[in-house]
Structure formats: structure tokens, C-alpha cells
Amino acid sequence: MRRYARTLVALALATSAVTGTAGWVSGDAQQALTGPPPGSAQWRADRAPGVELPDPERSTPAEVAAFFAGLSDEQQQLLLLRHPSVVGNLDGAPLELRYRANALVLSADGDPRYRSLAAPGRQILAFDPRGRGQVAEVFGDLRSAHRVSVVVPGSDNDAGTFDRKAAAHGAPPGMARTLQKAAGARTAVIAWAGYTTPVGFGIDAATGRLAEAGAGRLTRFAEGLTADGLPEPAVFCHSYGSVVCGLAAPRLPATDVVVLGSPGMRAEHVDALRTKARVWAAKDPTDWIDDVPSVRFAGLGHGTDPTDPAFGARRVPADDARGHSGYFEPGTDSLRAFAAIARGTAVEGAAR
């Protein structure tokens, strides 16, 4: 009976204590953004290019890549100009076209939340203004990179908060920028805020509903990278983002899956992830995520702490990181280890 009572208390805590970086506040239920890119109906109806266009929802990234490879430069440019919202978000399309398409969309978008994303020189690989907005930005030269990484953030992240200055190394572009700088010139890192995240605390953060939708989007995004001829990425998953990565793992093309500040991956052991990728986990001693119960019951909670030796992940040293958002702070052991993983080299101090 006492054990049952402890479980109930843990579940009550789990429903109110899993979040990202925004603090201890009540969360609002979110509607996951799913389906094809904006403008897909017009794309499907277009006969002007003189070729049958791939369905943005049903065609695989490999099929999209093969379609664009068979087009002339003139045909590619015509599609870019007629359907920038589709081309900019179409996984498998050439990244150079996606950059230009998203620059066009952002330059025409009047929403002040996204004004900074339109700054010259930014490499926006995906942008969807619907709902709270989703965005992916590249740091480094993605086309020539020998190694590629993707950063998947946790709660309270969207296109409108993407550029917040208050969390230089905790916001998605800050994490990606510092990782790419530490990993070196032959690497590229993508900050991927490409799913609907929970807002604050609440039932969204304690369940896998939004993570399930995000897992499908992350898998398709990574498949689009490899279909475009890029290396399989290492994926760095922060906080609720690690729930997304755990659910995506069986289908996700990745060399490594690295979770940090994780409430759990909705798996009790690394083998349950059914991934060929190496799985790493980091948690610093001051991270409040350690107070989140490692439980999963009746759909609530996310399961075993990935840094628990019983889980079986490779442990990343993170003793000198501070707080829930300090893992990418320059000079920390965690950032040095992340950079080694991003380069594909050995990690000193890592343990099984």
C-alpha cells in the first residue's frame, strides 16, 4: 500500500513537472501541427511546370529528391517562385532551393514575431508560420560538412521564441551555434524547432501526445537530409525533445542520439529504442529535471532516467554544467563531449 501511495505521488508530480526552459508555470493544451506544408493544395493543382508534382504529404523524401534531380534549373526555379512555402518545407528538396524559398517567404511575411528570421545571411531550412510557428536554421556549411548534427529542443520553443536573447546557450540557435563552433569547420549543426512543443507545465508535458507527432516530423526531416545526399546526423535532444527522440528512434536515421536534461525517452532500456545509433545521456547535478519522477503509468510520465546505469546509455560527463539549460555553455565538459560526438571522435570520460 505504501508503494502504491508513492506511485500516486510520483504520478501527480509527473503531470506538473516536465517542461523545457520557461519555468514553473501552468501549461495550455496545444494542438499538434501535422500534415503537409502550407500551400500544398495549390501545389497539387498546378499544371504549369509541365510535369506531375510529387504529393507533399504522401511522397517519401527519397521520391522528392529523385523528382528534383530530374528537373532542369529553369523548372526548379519556376517551382521555387510559384510555391516557396512548399519548396521551403519539402523534405528531400535540395537545401539550396529551400534556403531561397524560405528567404522569399520570410521577406514577405509581415508578422513581427518572425522579422529577425529574415535577416540576410541566415540559412533557414524550414519555416512554417502556422500556429505558433516552426523553423529550422543551419549553422555551418551543410553541403560540404563531413558530419551533421540536429538539435531538438524541449518545451516552450517555436518560431516566435526562436531568437530570444535571454537564453544564449539554452535557446535552439544558441545550442546549435555553440556546438558547431566547438565541433569545427567540417561540421554543420541544425537547430530544429520543427514540432509543436508543450507550453509550460501541464498535461502536454507529462504525456507523449505532442512527442508522437513530433517524432514523425523529425524522422521525415532527417530522411530528407540523407535523401539530399547529406550524412546521417547525430541528434541532440534536450528536455522534452528527448521524448520526441525516444519515440522517433526506431525509424530515425542517425549515427548518435544524445539526450540531455531528459525526463525519459518512453523506454525502460536502451534496447527498447530499437535503434542502430549510439545512445548517450547527460544530466548535471544542479538540473531540476532530477526532481521529475522516473515513472510511466497510464500514459503519464516518460519512464526510466536515461542517465541511470540500468538504462544502458553511454554517460556524457556534465558535472560542471549548471542548471537545466547549461549543457552547451562554453568551457563545460558536456559541450566538449558533445563536440566530440558531433565530429565522430572519441569522448573522453564517457561511461556505459
Image (tube, rainbow, N blue to C red):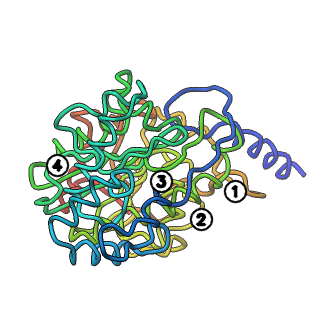
Q: Name the residue under label 3.
A: 307
Side of 184 relative to 224 (left or right): left
- Residues marked 1 and 2 touching at CB (< 8 Å): yes
- The disc, 1 or 3, on the residue closer to the chain's N-terminal end is 1
Q: Name the residue under label 4.
A: 183
Indicate the quadrant where residue 27 lies: top right
Image position, residue 135 (x, y; %): 39, 44
Q: Taking the image as drawn, is residue 314 in sight?
A: no
Three-letter code for the amino acid on which mark 4 is drawn: Ala
- Viewer-proximal residue among 160 and 210: 160
Q: Mark 1 points at which residue?
A: 296
Side of 202 relative to 46 (left or right): right
Q: Mark 2 points at which residue?
A: 268
Find the distance from the CA under tag 1 to the CA under tag 3. 16 Å
- The disc, 1 or 4, on the residue closer to the chain's N-terminal end is 4
Three-letter code for the amino acid on which mark 1 is drawn: Arg
Residue that appears at 21% across and 34% down: 331
Image position, residue 18 (x, y; %): 61, 40
Question: For the residue labelled by badge 1, is the local secondary structure a helix, a strand or a loop?
Answer: loop
Question: For the residue labelled by badge 3, is the local secondary structure a helix, a strand or a loop?
Answer: loop
